[in-house]
Amino acid sequence: MWRMPDVPPTLPWLIRIPEIFGEVVPDVVRQLASPCCTKLGHEYYLIRPADSGALRQVAASMFIRWNMPVQHSWPCRPRAMDGFVEKAAQTMARKFASAQPQMVLIGVLDASSTDTYYRKLASNLRGRALQLFPAAALPPPEVEAQDPGAATLFCLLGHEGLFCGLQSPRLANGFYPGGTRFFSQNTPDTISRAGAKVAEALHYLCLHRSPPPPPAHWLELGASPGGMTSELLARGYRVTAVDRAALHPRLAAAPGLTYACGDAAAFRPPAGTRYDAILSDMNGPASDSLAAVLRLSKYLVPGGLVIFTLKTAGVSGNAEVERLCAAVTARAASGGLQRLAQTHLTYNRHEFTLLFEKLGGAHSKPRSDTSSSSQPR
């Protein structure tokens, strides 16, 4: 059983705070009791939490999308250095190969840049590093196939240098360096960006449990215009979509879809109906949206999933947002919904995605954030 080793109190951490929350960075840094904070790349910050208690808050903060202890850093200018790939790969192997990480993943500190140099450099460095690690003879698994609780060597690269650390994907809050997989919404058949949002939410869910297998039945509240509906149908799910507004004409007579025109607060499923998952992306106060979810959760099977978008309109400041999240979590728990995780997705704006599970199912048991049932590979 892999457990994250004790982290020296002086060890720096690399955290990612979405640009949309840039104004709360000073408050987050103060909460983490970090005496210094250096911005790296586009959304990354190198901090030095003052104590182990502050370190535990790294993963708990709503505004931190991803985190990693920096166990090796090489501040340099890779673009101007001869032999950077070979030197970096040899050092990584010397420092981390004995830990036998399940994967070696290398990303870039500025994914928004149109300059592809560092993406190519990261790919070349990963290729060379895999030749030097003991598991290099095995075909690398898909990134999403990682054990969420086993050790991965995450690395971030940019013009500032190279930063590496061992962390489980679950503790890091993402399978990839920097977070979750990016899903493009720029396709001809895209109805709305919400489709990419639920795709990323289902990808993120795999850090904590498996998604419901198709043809599971979803109840979607606040479905119009149908971006999420379309994504769920494309994955082979059945969907009951509820909204006062109409769905996109493209979804008319879509196989597996039942559309209920009306307010989610007044919706009544047919007698005997059971849902495997509820998806709520409703606008309006979070308390109203949650009330609808809790009322309808009695139709959810034990162990059923809830994906809930926490809207924060009218709420200001990180402390107030965190209080709102805590209140929603407590109210959900009183209604039999256990929170699995919370995160900020790529297509979230000033909102967060919360994952809940109805108590009583196979997945419903206490979870450890520091261990897994398998050894690191």
Image (cartoon, rainbow, N blue to C red):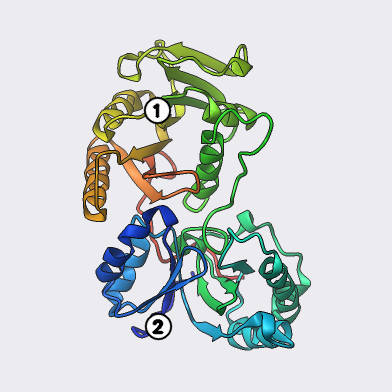
216 displayed left or right of 22: right
| Secondary structure state at the residue bearing disc 1 | strand
Quarter of the image where one finds residue 31:
bottom left
Disc on the earlier residue, 1 or 2: 2
Q: Is residue 319 above or below residue 186?
A: below
Count the marks: 2
Q: Judge by depth and name the residue closer to the eye, 301 or 269.
A: 269
Q: Which residue corresponds to the image point at 26% horizontal and 64% vertical from the top-left?
A: 27
At label 1, which amino acid type do we have?
Leu
Q: Is residue 255 above or below residue 337?
A: above
146 displayed left or right of 353: right
44 displayed left or right of 30: right
Q: Residue 6, how many percent across, how many down?
A: 39, 80
Q: Quadrant of the C terminus?
A: bottom right
Q: Residue 126, how many percent across, how many down?
A: 70, 72
**Residue 360 in view:** no
| Secondary structure state at the residue bearing disc 2 | loop
Q: Residue 146, how many percent across, how many down?
A: 60, 59
Q: Determine which residue is flagged by label 2.
A: 11
Mark 1 nearby-residue class (10 Å; few <14, some 14–19, many ≥20): many
Q: Determine which residue is flagged by label 1.
A: 300
Q: Judge by depth and name the residue closer to the eye, 225 or 286.
A: 225
Q: Which residue corresponds to the image point at 54% horizontal and 64% vertical from the top-left?
A: 374
Q: Residue 98, how many percent across, how many down?
A: 61, 84
364 displayed left or right of 114: left
At label 2, which amino acid type do we have?
Leu
Q: Is residue 355 above or below residue 128?
A: above
**Residue 312 in view:** yes
